[in-house]
């Protein structure tokens, strides 16, 4: 599989250890539900493609790391331009850009394959969650490294849930006590995630997130507290929510968790 890469130049005066942290930023989705003419990761909020925010928060983390940005091949050159614009001076991060697959799990697998051998902890993050904070990334990283399990951010379900049929009739109220809504970044020991994605039966399982892939392969997944600002752009109704968080960021405000 072909790939394009932008590799940062390390500061010659300060030797950096080999990176052990890898992040796969997934932005290869078509965005059909959003109704746009371009991939969702390149939808613009106030003139900035949302994937730009994800690149910025990852490369701001105080680690020696490798970020793989996974986008449609048609947008690889634009992604490289964004990396050059966003990457901090004297960074400890290297960044590569690779084309994605037809399904999300293929895109994640391509991202995993692009990580160097030194990586032992991997986070997978959806570019469609542009305002997940650096603190959330650190929370996931710390829990993965402390436990050796898969880790996902989660929010408690607060609304009443009903089970309905195809005609919209309510059949029952669902107990929400043990239910959570999960977000990204989701973190894993590299060997655990890579082994799960190598499973030949994965394609028929149609997983919707990386935790499901790991659990399908027999791995354990635990949760850490998520955050409201890690909201996902899926439909036009989500735009106003993300604009709120963008305004809050600009004002230097902390959003309630």
Image (cartoon, rainbow, N blue to C red):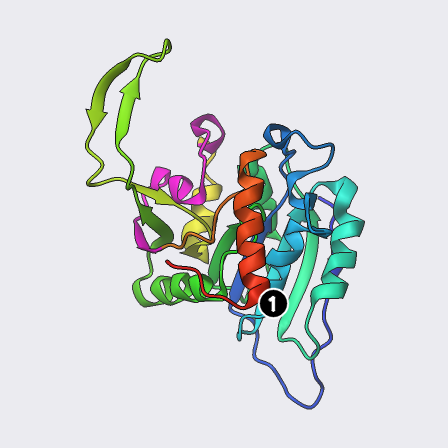
209 within the magenta span? yes
The image quarter containing residue 116 is bottom right
Quadrant assignment for the N terminus: top right
Spot occupied by residue 113 in the image (x, y as percentages of width and height): 59, 51
The answer to which of 45 and 146 lies nearer the viewer is 45
Q: Is residue 3 visible?
A: yes
Q: Is residue 218 above or below residue 166?
A: below
Give neighbour class at mark 1: few <14, some 14-19, many 20+ (Cα, 10 Å): many
In percent of the image, x 62 and y 37: which residue is there? 29
Q: Is residue 112 visible?
A: no
In this rendering, position of residue 31 left or right of residue 244:
right
In percent of the image, x 44 and y 34: which residue is there? 207
Badge 1 is on which residue? Answer: 59
Quadrant assignment for the C terminus: bottom left
Residue bounds of the magenta highlight = 202-225
Which structural element holds mark 1?
helix
């Amino acid at each position: 599989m072909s790939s394009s890469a932008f590799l940062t130049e390390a500061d010659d005066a300060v030797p950096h250890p080999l990176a052990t942290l890898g992040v796969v930023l997934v932005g290869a989705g078509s965005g059909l539900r959003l109704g746009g003419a371009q991939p969702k990761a390149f939808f613009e909020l106030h003139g900035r493609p949302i994937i730009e925010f994800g690149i910025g928060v990852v490369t701001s983390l105080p680690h020696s790391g490798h970020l793989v940005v996974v986008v449609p091949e048609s947008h690889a050159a634009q992604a490289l331009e964004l990396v050059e614009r966003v990457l901090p001076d004297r960074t400890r991060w290297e960044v590569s850009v690779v084309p994605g697959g037809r399904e999300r799990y293929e895109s994640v697998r391509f991202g995993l394959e692009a990580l160097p051998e030194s990586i032992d902890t991997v986070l997978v993050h959806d570019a469609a969650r542009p305002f997940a904070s650096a603190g959330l990334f650190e929370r996931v990283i710390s829990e993965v490294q402390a436990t050796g399990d898969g880790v996902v951010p989660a929010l408690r379900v607060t609304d009443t849930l009903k089970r309905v049929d195809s005609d919209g009739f309510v059949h029952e109220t669902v107990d929400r006590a043990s239910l959570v809504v999960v977000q990204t970044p989701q973190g894993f020991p590299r060997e655990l995630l890579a082994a799960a994605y190598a499973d030949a039966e994965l394609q028929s399982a149609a997983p919707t997130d990386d935790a499901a892939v790991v659990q399908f392969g027999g791995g354990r997944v635990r949760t850490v507290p998520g955050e409201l600002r890690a909201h996902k752009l899926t439909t036009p109704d989500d735009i106003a929510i993300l604009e709120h968080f963008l305004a809050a960021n600009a004002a230097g405000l902390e959003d309630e968790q």
